[in-house]
Amino acid sequence: MALAPRERLIDTSFKAVLLDSETRVLLGTNPRGEWELLGGRAEAQDATPQDTVRREVYEEAGIDITVGAIVDTWFYDVPGKGRVAVTSYLARPVGDVSLVLSAEHADLAFFHARELDDINLPEGYRRSIRLGIDQLRGRRGCDQCQGTRGVSGG
């Protein structure tokens, strides 16, 4: 049985639920005026999705991170652009944080979980962040991320 051709391919984006020592999440604003997790599409030099997350966060915010387990995967229908599969990974900064704003975002900021309902944030990101916080507090998914100290900024 032959498979019907796909009308369109679904892009994949790998994102970081990047939590600092105060369990605040790092978000950036996109051109649609939404806050979003940092990350993006894989490039040829990325050996793994985790490599993509590390590279993208460094490019978008100028910080080094450790990347742990998958937190969540969901579909996002980007207005006018199509569907994207968003896979998020638990991450923690390495060392002190001094954010460097790139051209990809109008702003970068850390948010506490209690602030997430008050910002323009797609529901899938909100869910991924809450799952990441639960994963971190349950000490699951990011063994190498546990105990990261000396984080400031935001």
Image: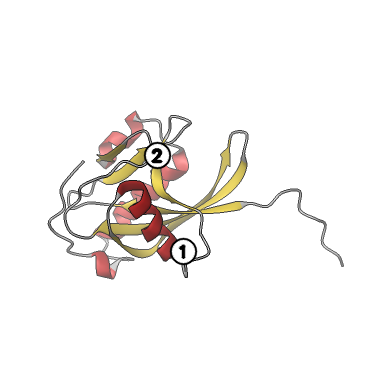
Q: Is residue 27 left or right of residue 47?
A: left
Q: Is residue 146 left or right of residue 90?
A: left
Q: Which residue is mark 2?
A: 103
Q: Position of residue 32 (x, y in %)?
A: 48, 31
Q: Is residue 90 left or right of residue 8?
A: left
Quadrant that contains the C terminus:
top left
**Camera-nearest residue between 62 and 41:** 62
Residue drawn at x 20%, y 50% as measured from the top left:
97
**Camera-nearest residue between 68 and 42:** 42
Mark 2 lies on a secondary structure that is loop
Kind of residue sitting beneath label 2: Ala
Residue drawn at x 27%, y 38% as measured from the top left:
109
Kind of residue sitting beneath label 1: Pro
In this picture, is 73 found above or below 118?
A: below
Q: Few, some or many C-alpha atoms within 10 Å of disc 1 (few <14, some 14-19, many ≥20)?
A: many
In this picture, is 77 found above or below 6?
A: above
Quarter of the rendering containing residue 125: top left
Count of marks, rendered view: 2
Q: CA distance from mark 2 to mark 1?
A: 22 Å
Q: Few, some or many C-alpha atoms within 10 Å of disc 2 (few <14, some 14-19, many ≥20)?
A: few
Residue drawn at x 43%, y 36% as measured from the top left:
30
In this picture, is 41 found above or below 126?
A: below
Residue drawn at x 55%, y 54% as measured from the top left:
12
Q: Which residue is mark 1?
A: 49
Q: Position of residue 46 (x, y in %)?
A: 47, 66
Mark 1 lies on a secondary structure that is helix
In this picture, is 111 found above or below 5?
A: above
Quarter of the rendering containing residue 106: top left
Q: Position of residue 103 (x, y in %)?
A: 39, 39
